[in-house]
Image: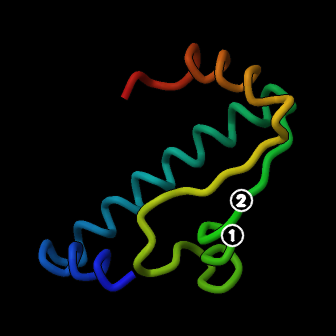
């Protein structure tokens, strides 16, 4: 955790805010795919903790933790390749 906060501190808080904003957009796109294709999912680890404890991201978090049932993973992978932007 300290190394991550030191990394972003050297670039300023705006860098981490931009990362978290981008993560939010990714989560919205992935959520839309899950909902449209009736794939159950849930947030886990730091993403879940941030949602509950901070009503958003943990202040130093820079990733998403999303879980789906293993039997739905191949279905999601195929759909994501078609529907998610290439970036």
User: Which residue is situated farthest in the left direction here?
Assistant: 10
| Picture quarter with the N terminus | bottom left
- Report how many numbered discs are placed on residues in the image: 2
- Indicate which disc, 1 or 2, sits on the residue closer to the N terminus: 2
Q: Are marks 1 and 2 in contact (CB under 8 Å)?
A: yes
Q: Is residue 20 left or right of residue 9?
A: right
Compare residues 5 and 56 and report the one nearer the observer: 5
Query: Circle 1 — which element?
Result: helix
Compare residues 32 and 15 and report the one nearer the observer: 15
- The image shows residue 18, relative to residue 22, as above or below, that is below
Q: Which residue is mark 2?
A: 43
Give neighbour class at mark 2: few <14, some 14-19, many 20+ (Cα, 10 Å): some
| Picture quarter with the C terminus | top left
Location of residue 55 (image quadrant): bottom right
Residue occupying image coordinates x 66% and y 16% = 78
Q: Position of residue 22 (x, y in %)?
A: 40, 52
Q: Is residue 24 left or right of residue 44?
A: left
Residue occupying image coordinates x 23% and y 71% = 14
- The image shows residue 18, relative to residue 9, as above or below, that is above
Q: Position of residue 86 (x, y in %)?
A: 40, 22
Give neighbour class at mark 1: few <14, some 14-19, many 20+ (Cα, 10 Å): some
Location of residue 37 (image quadrant): top right
Q: Which residue is mark 1?
A: 48
**CA separation, marks 1 and 2?**
5 Å
Compare residues 13 and 77 and report the one nearer the observer: 77
Residue occupying image coordinates x 85% and y 42% = 40
Residue occupying image coordinates x 60% and y 71% = 46
Q: Position of residue 23 (x, y in %)?
A: 46, 53
Q: Position of residue 6 (x, y in %)?
A: 22, 81
Query: Circle 2 — which element?
Result: strand
């Amino acid at each position: 955790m300290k190394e991550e906060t030191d990394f972003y501190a050297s670039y300023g808080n705006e860098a981490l805010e931009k990362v978290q904003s981008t993560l939010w957009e990714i989560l919205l796109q992935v959520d839309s795919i899950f909902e449209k294709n009736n794939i159950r999912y849930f947030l886990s680890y730091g993403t879940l903790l941030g949602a509950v404890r901070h009503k958003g991201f943990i202040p130093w978090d820079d990733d998403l933790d999303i879980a789906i049932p293993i039997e739905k993973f191949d279905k999601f992978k195929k759909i994501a390749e078609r529907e998610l932007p290439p970036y």
